[in-house]
Every structure is written in structure tokens, then in C-alpha cells.
Amino acid sequence: MYDSIIIGAGMSGLAAGIRSAYYDQKVCILERHNTIGGLNSFYRLRGRNYDVGLHAVTNFTPRGTRRGPFARLLRQLRLTWDEFGLSPQLMSSISFPNVELAFDNNIDLLRSEVARAFPNQIDNFEKLMDSLIDYDDLEQSHFEMSTRERLSEVITDPLLIEMILCPVMWYGNPREHDMDYGQFCIMFRALFLEGLARPFDGVRLILRKLVRKFRELGGELKLRTGVQQIKIDNGRAVGVILDCGDEMSAKNILSSVGAVETFRLCDDDDTTHVHKTGQLSFIEAISTLDTYPSELGHDKTIIFFNDSDKFHWQRPLEDLCDVRTGVICTPNNYCYDTADGKLPDGIMRITALADFNRWKNLNKDDYGRQKKIWFNKVVDSATQFAPDYREHTIDTDMFTPQTIHRFTSHDNGAVYGATRKWFDGTTNFKNLFLCGTDQGFVGIVGSIISGISMANHHLLRGN
Amino acid sequence: MTPAEIRDAVLDILDTINPDEDLSSLDDEKEFRDQLDMDSMDFLDIVMELRKRYRVQVPEEDYDNLVSMNKTVAYLEPKMKDISA
């Protein structure tokens, strides 16, 4: 009998595991795949290392900062700032036709950029920043307010509203078209008032650190161990049945596989509660170059681009993908420690919106063909906003919504999960709790905080 | 444990929870939250560390007793007097 079983060895599951094991619980993390990470994972292909998910760690604050989610995470996991090995971004931008706003980890740059490009909006922009709610002041009642409505009350130039929404929605909005205002505040702070950073060795460094910590504390991690069913007895979750048929029992179960996905695992779930799964999934086109992007004149860390004055955040309606908007991520363009040197290759990663169902319904031949077609289309679109690097390409890889679905078990390959969140982590069943994407915060720091707070509230309190 | 030993034990816990904090100037009369950058998660950790290290249980309704060093030591004294330092 375990104190806690945690389903999924992503950021949130590992963080919850560390908290539980640190406080002497007998805890086991079950992961269906042969590797850890879930939405934020890594792989090796033809001799090169790749990250999945991670473009940048948001919420970055400098060494010695006491406040904010990143500092909180370090304290709660008893880790030091140095252990995350984060290097800050160089500079990023929001790029629309004929207008660009640069930003870095000091909000003053974005301020001056807004003043330059939208001189009659700078006072409004300041007003908006003053009104951004502190993380701890977020109230459920304000959380679901329309961000578009709220922004249009403060900012009177529609183009600036679209330009603010573009990066914030890209990095953490599970809803189409509009965004919960609470989520907007969280993401705005995470992106602009805190900042972007990356470990030189990518997301694997963070994951390995978490796994090592978890194991040192006596936690058990079982890879290639999927859960086919959560056993319910009299309204209580009592254990799990594994894919292999074995059973395990526990006092508490914490699931990071998504809300709807978790309810489906429960053998007597009340199916009258139909919750909406998210619709937003992505493709990513990764190019390895024979040179560094900086040699081609590309010094930006991240570019959030949109090819018209109106930003469309929705599932593609007519095609496999929508490449009108996207994110260009260049892992080389971080301020790495001189001791680390340079990454071995130049890398350009382009992310665009994709429709899960259309990708799922392709047969094998079409799937391969469409991957090639859309790889080219997304790079075509991105190179309107960054130097054309195509002739320097020496290797490529691509993931689709199918890939995301396979590695995360999330319905629709929905990266940011369901459109509503389960902030308190509770379910219809006693002793079954949610953490991760569908509990609340997104991003690497957000999901780790999710695991920590759900472990604190549900696994540790009173046990 | 004597009250002085309990105070040291609590200081050690605070140092574990928040290693960057300078505890040398802590005023035992004043509330922790007015002197230290601690949030609700950190406060829960004081309770959790007491349980982990000394098997001392602090029920949720008693959390208000842990607001300052003096109040914490006074609250813990009967619970920890039989524990050897």
C-alpha cells in the first residue's frame, strides 16, 4: 500500500513526488512511456539532442530573487538557483507586418518599444501594467473575465491589443479566440515582468535534476507502466490497474494526465459530466543548420509572429495547420555562460497551430507527405519575420498533434489542456486529485508549482 | 528540549525552508511574515518539518500559534519538552 500514487512523470508529477517523498511518504510515480517529461521532454535523433515543448522557461527571475513562482519553486523543492542552470534570453520580439515590439527580461525595453511604436498608447499600457493582479491576489471570480474586453477598456489601438495577446496566448491559453483574464495576468507576468531563460543542456537538465532528487528521497519511478483504470470503491479511489493487469493500491492518487482523461480512467465515472477538452494543438518544424543563426544576422531568442493586423487564436478550420501566426525559437540565442561555450549546432524551431483530427485521420503515406508539405509552409511563413535559413539546413525533424497525443495522452493533443481548469485539484472522487496542465498553471515553472501545491494540499496535509 | 533549544530547532527549520534569508536579525517578538519573505506554502513547511524531524503534530486549527518566534516556542514547549535535543 502506497501513501500516494502519481500518474505521469512530467514536471508536475515529479514535483509532487519530491514533496511527498521529502516528507517520508511511500510514493510511486507511474509513467506509460519509456522516458520522463510528458509535455516537456527530450529525445536524441541521428546523434543530436532535441527538446520537446520547451522554447523557454518563463517566470525567470535572477539569482537572489525571493518572490514569484520560480523562487517559491526552489524553496519548496529545496533546490538552489544554480541547480536549474538557467541562462537568460538575449532579446525577443512580437513581429507583425510593419511593426515590431522588442522585449527582454527587463520590462523597460518593452515599455520604450510601446512608446516608440504606439506613442499615444504608452499611458494606457502603463495603466494596464499597474492593474495586473499579483499572483496571490487572483480571485476565482475575476479569473474568467474576458481578456479582450478588459484590454479594450484600457487600450484604444486594436493593433496593440492584438500584439499583446499574440505572445501571451501562444505561451499559455487553452481557450480559442479569447483568454481568461486571470490566465492573461499570470502569463503576462511570466513573460514580461519576469522573463525567459533556458538551461544550456535544455529541458533534460531540469528533468534529470528532479528525478535524481525524487529517487534520493526514496521515491519510486516506474517507466513503461501505464494505468488502464483507476479503481473506485464507494466514491473513493483505492488504487490503479496497470496496462499489464497488475494492481496497486494507495491512500491517495494524483493524476497529471488531464482532467477528462483522468475521469475516463475511473471505472464508474458519472459520464453525465461532459467536460470540454481543449482544441489547440501544434506542429513544430525543427531545422538543424550548418551555421549559427547569429551568422545569418538572427539574434532574437523568440519571435512571436503574425502575418496580418488581426491575430487568430483558434483551431485551423479548413486545413491541417494555420501558419498565419507562429513562434520562432532559437535555442542558440541565450546568454549562456562562457564556460558552457556554444551549442553544437544552429537550431531554428517554428511552431504553428494545427488541427488534431485532420492529422489523426491521415493514412500513413499521406501523413508523411503532409508533414513535408507543412514543414515547408510553416518555414515559408516564419521567414517573413526572420532571415531565410533554408539553404543552411542539414537536418530536420517535425512533430505533429499526433506526436503530442502519443507522448502526453492528452485528448486532441491539446498542449494547454482543457478550456476550464480545476484549480483546487479535487474530483468527484475522494482521494483522487488532479495536477498539471488541467489543474491550472502552464509552462515549466507553472506545472512544477502545480505539482507542489497539489501535493501540499492533498497528499501531505493531515496525513 | 528547553525553550532555547526549541528556538534553535525552529531557526534551523526556517533556514532549511528559506536558505537565502538572513535570520540573525530576527526579532522574536515580531511576526515572521513582517520580517521574512514567507508565503503560505512556507508556513505549511514549518509544520511539516516539525512533524518530519520531531514527530510533533500541529493541527490546522493551531497554525495561528506559529506567527512569531516567541509564540511558536511557547506553543511547542509542552509538545517538545520530552524530546532530547
Image: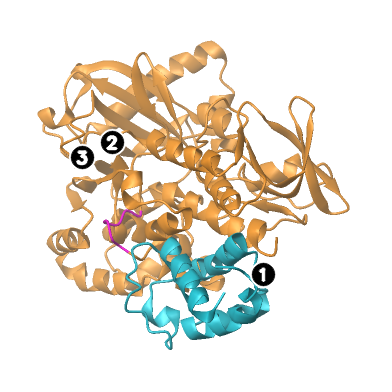
| Residue A262 image position (x, y, % from top left) | 69, 44
Q: Name the residue under label 2.
A: A200
Looking at the rendered structure, the secondary structure element under dot 2 is loop
Q: Amino acid type of disc 3?
A: Tyr
Looking at the rendered image, the disc whose residue lies closer to the viewer, 1 or 3, is: 1
What chain is colored cyan? B
Question: Furthest residue to the top?
Answer: A365
**Marks 1 and 3 share the same chain:** no
Q: In this view, does A106 lie above or below B34?
A: above
Q: Mark 1 points at which residue?
A: B57
Q: In the displayed structure, would residue B20 be above or below residue A26? A: below
Label 1: element kind: loop
Badge 3: chain ID: A
**Callout 1: few (<14), some (14-19), or many (20+) C-alpha neighbours within 10 Å?**
some
State left or right for residue B61 relative to residue A85: right
Q: Do the residues labelled 2 and 3 touch (CB within 8 Å)?
A: yes
Colouring used for the render = by chain
Spatial separation of the CA atoms under disc 1 and disc 3:
46 Å
- The chain displayed orange equals A
The Cα–Cα distance between marks 2 and 3, rounded to whole angstroms, is 7 Å
Q: Do the residues labelled 1 and 3 touch (CB within 8 Å)?
A: no
Q: Does the magenta stretch include residue A263?
A: no
Residue stretch rendered in magenta on the structure: A59-65
Amino acid, disc 1: Gln
**Horizontal arrangement in the rendering, residue A286 relative to residue A113 (left or right):** right
- The amino acid type of the residue labelled 2 equals Phe
Front: mark 2 or 1: 1
